[in-house]
């Protein structure tokens, strides 16, 4: 028997009353979320994460990238980024007529968010369980208006980002290291796996006229929207997709990637390994993978399982650039 979630405990104990009618918005849900206390047919899940969107849509739930219309209640699943947490709460308050429920782990900063919300609204006593808290309140949109998502910001190099995306405040040093060590020729068809807001694709296209198409694959809808602004080149094709599952229409010459290595709060080298396997599947037999990673991540073993030649071509005390070439037959 599964352990009840904080939400289930609050509802079953009669502490939290859900509206009998109206849709319920669920902001930033994550796979594994216990929604048993919510009427599934009335839930509208709002997420910019392609893997999460596909997961919940596969369960038959109604999903979207942005809110649509008004809601009778809202559940906000706190992300780790404080600016994004603030923005989600402000967005939920603006479109919800009833109760607003906030749920998060301590490592997501839920205790700080609770303190901040208490200064703006009449907040319930929290439900504490499993190193996290759940609380709820009612509020008018003016109470959290200053938490609303700010518009795109311009950073070094004229690139634009928005709060909550990876490396929103500046160019990621690992991506810069990889871009600085890409070869002069990458081939006609290139894929940027987990391309974020577009830095690697933009750099790859500079001075490489032989590239006919570069496909940027990104699971974060907000980051992809920034990439559309940052990669202003007709050769770039952008996809809102899960990089570990997407496949090109034909084998490609090169894959460039700075794979993420966190799943929620925990370091997860398996995610980077999945990127390596995905790259091997989409490359031509003589195709090449160019990957940057934190120095401590053990990616060489996975790369040697899929490529006949693997070398570290650059690095420092923090990062390493790995080059794999010649896709092994067993990997295909």
Image (cartoon, rainbow, N blue to C red):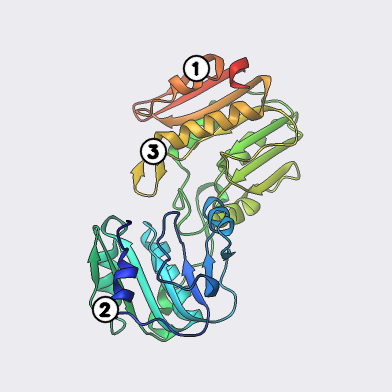
Q: Earlier in the sequence, mark 1 or mark 2?
A: 2
Between disc 3 and disc 2, the foreground one is: 3
Q: Is residue 108 left or right of residue 44?
A: left
Residue lying at 40% horizontally and 45% vertically, measured from the top left: 263
Q: Which mark is residue 304?
A: 1
Which element type, helix, strand or loop, lies under badge 2? helix
C-alpha span from label 1 to label 2: 53 Å
Which quadrant of the structure image shows residue 164? Answer: bottom left
Which quadrant of the structure image shows residue 58? Answer: bottom right
Where is mark 3, residue-wise?
268
| Mark 2 Cα shell of 10 Å, populated few (<14), some (14-19), many (≥20) | few
- Regarding residue 169, the answer to whether it shows in the image is yes
- Regarding residue 328, the answer to whether it shows in the image is no
Q: Which mark is residue 118?
A: 2
Residue 311 drawn above or below residue 148: above
Q: Nearer the viewer, residue 307 or 125?
A: 125
Residue lying at 48% horizontally and 53% vertically, measured from the top left: 165
Which quadrant of the structure image shows residue 134? Answer: bottom left
Which element type, helix, strand or loop, lies under badge 1? helix
Residue 59: horizontal and vertical position, in percent?
A: 55, 58
Residue lying at 48% horizontally and 73% vertically, measured from the top left: 39
Q: Earlier in the sequence, mark 3 or mark 1?
A: 3
Q: Which part of the image, by quadrant, shows the N terminus? A: bottom left
| Mark 3 Cα shell of 10 Å, populated few (<14), some (14-19), many (≥20) | some
Residue 12: horizontal and vertical position, in percent?
A: 31, 75
């Amino acid at each position: 028997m599964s352990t009840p979630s904080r939400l289930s405990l609050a509802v079953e104990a009669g502490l939290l009353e859900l509206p009998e009618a109206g849709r319920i918005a669920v902001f930033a849900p994550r796979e594994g979320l216990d929604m048993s206390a919510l009427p599934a047919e009335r839930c509208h899940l709002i997420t910019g994460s392609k893997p999460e969107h596909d997961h919940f849509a596969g369960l038959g739930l109604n999903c979207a990238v942005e809110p649509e219309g008004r809601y009778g209640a809202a559940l906000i699943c706190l992300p780790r980024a404080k600016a994004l947490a603030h923005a989600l709460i402000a967005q939920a308050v603006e479109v919800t007529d009833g109760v607003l429920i906030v749920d998060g782990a301590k490592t997501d900063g839920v205790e700080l968010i609770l303190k901040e919300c208490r200064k703006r609204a009449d907040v319930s006593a929290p439900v504490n369980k499993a190193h996290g808290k759940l609380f709820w309140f009612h509020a008018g949109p003016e109470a959290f208006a200053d938490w609303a998502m700010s518009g795109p910001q311009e950073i070094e190099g004229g690139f634009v980002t928005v709060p909550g995306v990876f490396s929103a405040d500046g160019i990621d040093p690992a991506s810069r290291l990889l871009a600085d060590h890409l070869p002069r020729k990458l081939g006609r068809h290139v894929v940027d796996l987990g391309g974020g807001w577009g830095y690697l694709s933009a750099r790859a296209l500079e001075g490489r006229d032989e590239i006919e198409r570069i496909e940027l694959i990104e699971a974060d809808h907000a980051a992809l929207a920034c990439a559309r602004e940052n990669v202003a080149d007709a050769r770039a094709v952008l996809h809102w997709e899960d990089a570990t599952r997407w496949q090109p229409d034909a084998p490609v010459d090169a894959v460039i990637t700075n794979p993420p290595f966190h799943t929620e709060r925990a370091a997860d080298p398996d995610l980077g390994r999945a990127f390596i396997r995905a790259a091997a599947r989409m490359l031509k037999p003589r195709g090449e993978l160019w990957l940057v990673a934190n120095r401590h991540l053990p990616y060489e073993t996975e790369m040697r399982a899929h490529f006949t030649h693997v070398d570290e071509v650059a690095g420092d005390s923090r990062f390493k650039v790995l080059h794999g070439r010649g896709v092994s037959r067993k990997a295909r």
